[in-house]
Image (cartoon, rainbow, N blue to C red):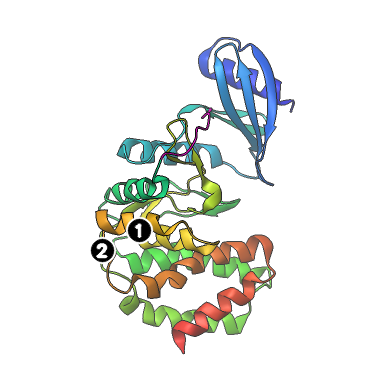
Amino acid sequence: MNPADAFRMSWEQSFHRFADVVAIHPLGGGSINSVYKVETTDGQFVMKMNSLSRYPGMFKGEAAGLQLIMDTKSVSVPGIVAVTALKQHQVLILEYIEPAPRIKHFYSHFGEQLAAMHRHTSETFGLSFNNYIGSLPQNNKQEKSLYDFFIQHRIEPQLRLAVRKELLNDRDEKDFEDLFKKLEHLLPDEHPSLIHGDLWNGNYITGNDGKAWLIDPAVSYSSREADIAMTKLFGGFEPEFYSAYHEVFPLIDGWEQRLDLWNLYPLLVHVNLFGGHYVQEVRSIVKNYIR
């Protein structure tokens, strides 16, 4: 579908009036979404489009996740303008954030913001709705136990998919079973935290206030260590991010030894999406915990 037509149709469906599109500029969106900056007489927006049949409910989940973060009044996120379904496509329209120079101590402030977000808790691990991580469905069935939630709704679905795709094998399944037997004594004893769920360098931007703004969430109530671990998976944030976080909301002793444990989930997602060297990374981490 022509992106200008998609924007007009989505705008009309949402606000019952026509949109005057002045210009459209493609933005980077990866293999899942087509992403555009849309200039209109009503302002500037970001529009994301993808296949409704391939990724049903993806943008509804993303919008709900952005709203959850927004409601914490901790870390900024783009405003949600519209979520619509147009025949074969779904469309998400967001506020366009004009970037500004980063404030002094950008990462320290970011660490403090994330710590404040993580203080928002729930009675259960999980969420009242499902969403996606990358292009893969993420089941957020609520559980009282972090042990049950992490195994049943994070690791096992990705493990089963990887075995089905013959990326992992029976030996790998046995190693994971051995890991599961140890998990009850490895996982931290903490209340659930609202986490971003996919917090790497590509999923925050510098906003018009010069501070960090979160995008592309895969939210749930889970262990906050999962977010911290993800920040370190592909290079890590600046050291002042972690020191500022610790000052506001200190992590439980042993958190550094658990980083690889949490990163098994995003790494299994990468196994299922990309295969390659991620398979060996997963195997190596599991072996380290069960030996």
* Nearer to us in this view, 223 or 170: 223
At label 2, counting other C-alpha atoms closer than 10 Å, the crowd grade (few under 14, some 14-19, many 20 or more) is few
Q: Residue at x 56, y 9 (%)?
A: 17
Task: Check disc 1 and report its element: helix, strand or loop.
Answer: helix
Q: Position of residue 81 (x, y in %)?
A: 49, 25
Chief SS of the magenta region: loop
**x and y percent of residue 290 in the render?**
45, 86
What residue is shown with label 1? 224
Q: Amino acid at mark 1?
A: Arg
Cβ atoms under marks 1 and 2 closer than 8 Å: yes
Specify the amino acid type for callout 2.
Glu
Above or below residue 170? Residue 246 is above
Indicate left or right for 158 with 52 as reference.
left
Whether residue 225 appears in magenta in the rendering, the answer is no
Is residue 100 shown in magenta?
yes
Residue 212 in which image quadrant: top left
Residue at screen point 48% across, 63% down: 232
Quadrant of the image for the N terminus? Answer: top right
Q: Nearer the viewer, residue 289 or 247?
A: 247
Give residue 190's mark.
Answer: 2
Q: Position of residue 228 (x, y in %)?
A: 41, 60
